[in-house]
Image (cartoon, grey):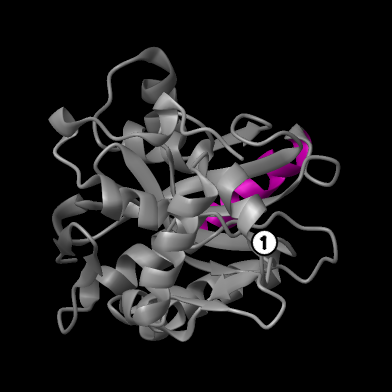
Amino acid sequence: MAAETPTARVPASAGGVIAVTRALQLLEAFNLGESHLSLAELSRRCQLHKTTVLRLARTLALSGYMVQRDDGEWRLGPSAGWLGARYQAGFDVQNELEPALRELTQQSGESAAFYVREGNVRTCLVRVEGPQALRHHARMGEGLPLDQGSPGHVLLAFSGQPGDIYEQIRKRGYHWSIGEREQGVSTVSAPVFGRNWRLLGSLCISGPASRLPVERLQELAPTVIAAANRLSYMLSANTSAPLQTRSGYWHP
């Protein structure tokens, strides 16, 4: 039985509701591609007692966020899928972002993504997978560190972050990284702006470092910059629908 360690607890001073935090832990325990998990595995990943996990899972099942299979294992329920669909529907992705990413993917042969800053993390808003069998996978909506990986560094640089590295990024207009956040992954990113040069996000292509060494990243940088500039122009001209995130709106 897994012991409830201090890392699994939320202090009252943090202002969080422990039961809600633990329920979210349970939903986030599933990795991309995992269709079901046993109670024991959920207990291990969440660092909670099995009885606690079972109580949480049964509560989530009442609202359709989890479903127990005939063999006793648990999977995410239809309500979790609808929640993700409603989250993504809050963004103006079909008209502007997704076609731009698809075009960049075709030009570069690699996966493309658009990241936004939400507080102290960066979030993958939209992603289009590349055609290669071996590629880097990232979960949309997942909060990632700003100071690791080229998308985050670009967001920091064009948000006015002081420091030599950020001054260099502002001068170049792009940034690349290899294995900075995730071992064996290369990325190159450029900023996307709205009206009055307001930073909206960073456009990024990513792939395995074996296929994207420094020389290749530098070759692809002008392609990423050009795509970011086109997207900036389109978003600046679009006054009908703002970009919406969990923390508010951007008006290009």
| Quarter of the N terminus within the rendering | top right
For the residue pair 84 and 4, the one nearer the viewer reads as 4
Can I make out residue 203 in this image?
no
Mark 1 lies on a secondary structure that is loop
Q: Quadrant of residue 157?
A: top left
Establish if 245 lies above or below 21.
below
Q: Position of residue 110 (x, y in %)?
A: 71, 61
| Residue sitting at x 19%, y 66% | 252
Q: Position of residue 132 (x, y in %)?
A: 82, 66
- For disc 1, the marked residue is 38
The reply to whether the magenta stretch includes residue 161 is no
The residue stretch that appears in magenta: 215-226
| Residue sitting at x 36%, y 77% | 83
For the residue pair 71 and 242, the one nearer the viewer reads as 71
| Magenta span dominant secondary structure | helix
| Residue sitting at x 14%, y 28% | 13
Question: As drawn, is 98 to the left or to the right of 164?
Answer: right
Q: Position of residue 35 (x, y in %)?
A: 67, 72
Label 1 neighbour load within 10 Å: few <14, some 14-19, many 20+: some
Question: As drawn, is 23 to the left or to the right of 51?
Answer: left
Q: Quadrant of residue 184?
A: top right
